[in-house]
Amino acid sequence: MELRSLKGKLLVAAPTLREPTFARTVISLLEHTDDGALGVVINRPGDASLLEVVPPVAELASQPAVLFSGGPVEPQAAIALGVVITDATPEGWRPVVHPVVTVDLEVDPSVLAHSLRALRVFAGYAGWSAGQLEDEIAEGAWYVVESLPSDAFDALPDRLWSTVLRRQPWPLSAVSTCPLDPTMN
């Protein structure tokens, strides 16, 4: 059976997923193949300013202009996401799902400035081996929902979990008001 790729979708942690690494997270899936999946947590802003960590692209960054915690795998690695301007030349970036792209932070920022209207940098990522993500979804740990281009660049990332759930059809939208401890509902 052929795998239906979830690339470009959001994974929203179910309230029952209380393990601290992924509790209340929203993950943008950047890759999903038979070999596994890779994404970044888009709602965990860090304390470090991009000006301190990646000064060349700090001016291009969406607010808050901080380094986000993208996940527990390779936390020293940086993954940047951007939103491209319509008809931009693909120089320094690779499409995820139009208009969201992954951005090469080694490219001259002046080149990027001509094609990007949003940028966010993540330290680390979330990864799954072959079949692991599908098993977690089947167990009810994640809701798979459509993404909006603005999700990864939301100015209020701490509220993104509720925001994404609230825009889903009933009954999933009701989950947006679930307390931190679902047993207290």
Image (tube, rainbow, N blue to C red):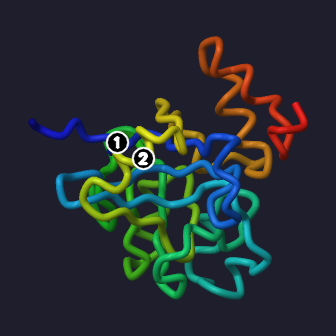
Residue 118: give x, y in percent of width and height: 56, 53
Residue type at mark 2 is Val
Q: Residue at x 67, y 61 (%)?
A: 19
- Label 1 CA crowd tier, 10 Å (few <14, some 14–19, many 20+): some
For label 2, the residue is 100
Q: Nearer the viewer, residue 136 or 31?
A: 136
Distance, label 2 to label 1, CA atoms, is 5 Å
Element on which disc 1 rests: strand
Q: Residue furthest top?
A: 170
For label 1, the residue is 97
Q: Is residue 47 left or right of residue 129?
A: right
Quadrant of the snapshot with the N terminus: top left
Quadrant of the snapshot with the C terminus: top right
Q: Nearer the viewer, residue 92 or 183?
A: 183
Q: Residue at x 72, y 71 (%)?
A: 66
Q: Residue furthest front?
A: 183
Question: Which image quadrant is residue 106 in?
Answer: bottom left
Residue 114: give x, y in percent of width and height: 44, 58
Q: Residue furthest right?
A: 184
Residue type at mark 1 is Val
Residue 121: give x, y in percent of width and height: 56, 69
Does the CB distance between marks 2 and 1 fall below 8 Å? yes
